Image (cartoon, rainbow, N blue to C red):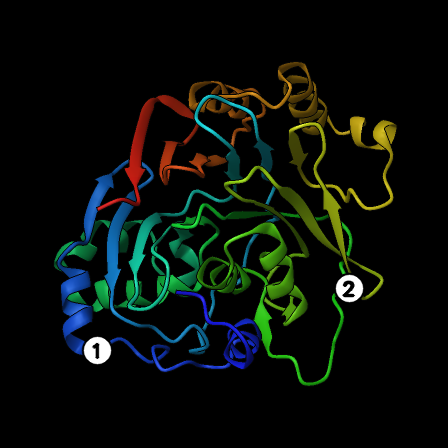
Amino acid sequence: MTPSGPSRRAFLLGVPLAAACAPRASDGERSLATLRVVDPALPLLSMTLYGPYDVWRPLALAPPRTLFACSLFAARNGPDGPVLGRNFDWDPNPALLLTTRPPGGPATLSMVDLAYLGVGRDAALRAPRDRRVARRLLNAVRLPFDGMNEHGLAIGMASLPSPALPPRLPGRPTTGSVRVHRLVLDRARTVDEAVAVFRAHNVDFTDSPPLHYLVADRDGDAAVLEFVDRRLSVVRGADGWHAMENALLTGADAADRARHRRYRIMSGRLRAAGGALDADAALALLGEVRQRHTRWSAVYRLRDGVLHYTLNGDPARRRTARLAG
């Protein structure tokens, strides 16, 4: 349940609430009992995290070796309702499909790159039977690389080739560039509320490339959030769709945006469809802009909490996850 009044301000600013504490030991054991290897090829693991968690707990992150790539779009008018589609293009690291069910907060589904927690391929495969490695995965809640909450709010990111300059506002908590996804998933129901979470925090790119973000909600609103000249720029979607890849949208006209191949393909398909894509068509579009290093392709259905995804660019390895239940 989202608080209001003074507690709403504390919620957006990230001030710990009563439920925001470290996971109890029993919650950790219950969570680790759900750990499974879903697909050994990536590999992909899955886990449900029960109980409260402290989003601000410090993490020692493994530094990235190369730049993210990534392609994202939102489509409003399909038969399944609004969807957010995303290719995560990155090093061949293991991943975790994480479900969270915190008390007093929304359930979420998210994908996590486990290399940032220092978990490589071999360690990931043995995690269900190696308690030392498995316990490391309890920290994955702080690093969703894309995700959706039960309110139908989804978020994902892509890197930018040039430095982004976030504002540094006194009195605002500072969060990492991926950890901000967790704050949005835990605190926002709509795109406007997601923007408010960004405005309430200083975003730090020290441990990552500069990023921009796509957020979309169950009502069909979508926006790209970018940092330009120490200000947060909010670029709204139009005509039932939105799209981004690895180039700033702020200040770019249609011709500038069309110079980027993946954006050109996505915008062309979305415009022709009037933003009306079902999950199959959304995955097909992600396939059109897939790259050799696409790790996962995810389509989040925002009205019913269903995630359709494929791994390693292989449409035959399609899977489904659900928030319900």
Image x and y of residue 85, in percent:
52, 34
At label 1, counting other C-alpha atoms closer than 10 Å, the crowd grade (few under 14, some 14-19, many 20 or more) is: few
Residue at the image position 31 percent from the left and 49 percent from the top: 121
Q: Hey, which residue is sitting farthest top in the picture?
A: 272
Residue assigned mark 2: 165
Q: Residues within 10 Å of mark 2 (few under 14, many from 20)?
A: some
Instruction: Indicate the amino acid at tag 2.
Output: Leu
Residue drawn at the location 26% of the way across and 75% of the way down? 23
Q: Position of residue 216 (x, y in %)?
A: 57, 43
Q: Is residue 132 visible?
A: yes
Q: Quadrant of residue 203?
A: bottom right
Above or below: residue 98 compared with residue 204: above
Q: Which mark is residue 207?
A: none
In this image, 267 relative to 188: left or right? Answer: right
- Amino acid, disc 1: Arg
State which quarter of the image contains the N terminus: bottom left
Dot 1: what SS?
loop
Q: Mark 1 or 2 closer to N-term?
A: 1
What residue appears at the point 54 percent right and 47 percent down from the top-left corner? 156
CA gap, disc 1 and disc 2: 38 Å
Q: Residue furthest bottom?
A: 171
Q: Which residue is mark 1?
A: 24
Viewer-proximal residue, 64 or 237? 237
In the rendered image, the vertical position of residue 209 relative to residue 255, given as above or below: below
